[in-house]
Amino acid sequence: MKAKLRIAIDGPAGAGKSSAARGLAQRLGYVYIDTGAIYRALAWRAIQQGLDVERHAEAIADIAGRMQVEFRGTDGGQHIFVDGEDLERQVRLPEVGAMSSPVSAIPLVRQNLLQLQRDLAAGGGVVMEGRDIGTVVLPDAEMKVFLTATAEERARRRFEQLKGDHPEVTFEQVLAEQEERDRRDSSRAVAPLRKADDAHELVTDGMSLDEVIDRLARMARGMESDADV
């Protein structure tokens, strides 16, 4: 029986981590753990309770320490459940996404969610993606990938997504925002984005999503052992 891996996928914004991680998990029959959804679920709880990041950081961190999170398969795909409640729709709301970034920057929040994330991955058979999975959350993961692309390539992909609904947006604007976000993510004090020393770096310029998933799946299957789990 093949051992099931803990797969950590990190990388900058716009690199396609979520799509690749979700597709890889489906290919391998693993659970996809979207750590961003966990922070958005916390942001939703904070909004519900009228909490403000600046004034109520400790209260938000306390909620983080008590949250029970599961990722379950449903008829509509995999959903996030918090304290038994399906929050998949709520965590995708724009206002929740906007609040999740400052919420995730609270040091005690990240500390309180660290063990939760490790517990979700403890049994193996998971693909977990984020910004600090291979460096902080799962430093001993059996497979680590740093998925990236040039700033220009990531901006081009984002521009293609936006231009239909937002014809006023220019590629130059998107690229400038991309480079600014890269700077923030790499220099922030809490869980800065960086490649783990033992991570496999995959630059996806010129690759389709299927090609990326194929490459990752081959890597994972090559690392799966025949040892009993």
Image: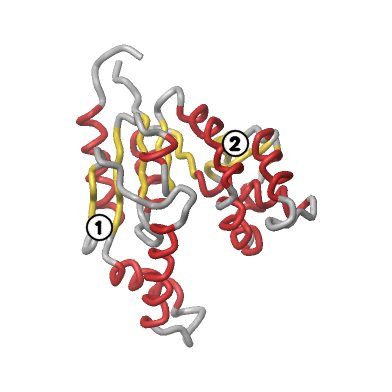
Relative image position of residue 186 (x, y in whole percent)? 39, 57
- 116 over 21 or under it: above or below: above
Residue nearest the viewer, comparing 218 with 191:
191
Dot 2 falls on a residue whose secondary structure is helix
Q: Residue at x 76, y 53 (%)?
A: 51
Q: Amino acid at mark 1?
A: Thr
Q: Residue at x 46, y 75 (%)?
A: 162
Q: Earlier in the sequence, mark 2 or mark 1?
A: 2
| Residue 148 numbered mark, or none | none
Question: 90 left or right of 144?
Answer: right
Give neighbour class at mark 1: few <14, some 14-19, many 20+ (Cα, 10 Å). some
Depth check, mark 2 against mark 1: the one in front is 2
Question: 4 left or right of 137?
Answer: left
| Residue 112 numbered mark, or none | 2
Q: Quadrant of residue 134?
A: top left
For disc 1, the marked residue is 204
From this viewpoint, which residue is outermost toward the front?
A: 189
Query: In this rendering, does residue 26 appear at all?
Result: no
Q: Quadrant of residue 140?
A: top left
Q: How many marks?
A: 2
Q: Residue at x 42, y 39 (%)?
A: 128
Q: Quadrant of residue 59?
A: top right
- 125 over 155 or under it: above or below: above
- 205 over 45 or under it: above or below: below
Query: Decide: marks 2, 1 in contact (CB < 8 A)?
Result: no
